[in-house]
Amino acid sequence: MIDHKLNELIKKIASSNLSETDKKPLIASCQDIKSTIHTMNQNQLENIKQTHQKLSELEKFEINHPHITSCIDILARTLSRLGV
C-alpha cells in the first residue's frame, strides 16, 4: 500500500511542471523512504521469526522443567503482590 502510494507520488513529481533540479531531490527522497520502509519490513519479519523461536524454546523449557517453572511463577507472583 505504502509502496504503491510512493510510486504514484514519484510519477506525479516526474510529470509535474517542476524544474529538473527540484524534481531530482524529491524523487530521491521518495526512493529513500521506499528503501527504508522495505528495510524496516524485513527487520520486522526477522524479529517475528526470532520471537516465535524463543517462545518455542520457552515452551520446551516449561515442559522439561515443570518444578523450576512452578517455583519461578510462585516467586514472581509473591514479588508482584509485595509491590516489587
Image (tube, rainbow, N blue to C red):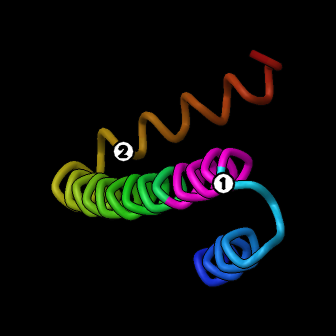
Query: Which residues fall within the magenta stretch?
Result: 21-34
Q: Position of residue 77 (x, y in %)?
A: 66, 36
Chief SS of the magenta region: helix
Q: Look at label 2 and name its amino acid.
A: Thr
Query: Is residue 22 highlighted in magenta?
Result: yes
Q: Are marks 1 and 2 in contact (CB under 8 Å)?
A: no
Residue 67 visible in the picture:
yes
C-alpha distance separating marks 1 and 2: 65 Å
Above or below for 49 versus 20: below
User: For the residues carrying marks 1 and 2, which lies nearer the camera in this image?
Assistant: 1
* Helix, strand or loop under label 2: helix
* Residue positioned 79% across, 19% down in the render: 82
Q: Which quadrant would residue 5 be assigned to in this image? A: bottom right
Above or below for 38 versus 79: below
Residue 1 visible in the picture:
no
Dot label at residue 2:
none
Dot label at residue 69:
2
Q: Look at label 1 and name its amino acid.
A: Glu
**Residue picked out by circle 1:** 20
* Residue positioned 74% across, 69% down in the render: 13
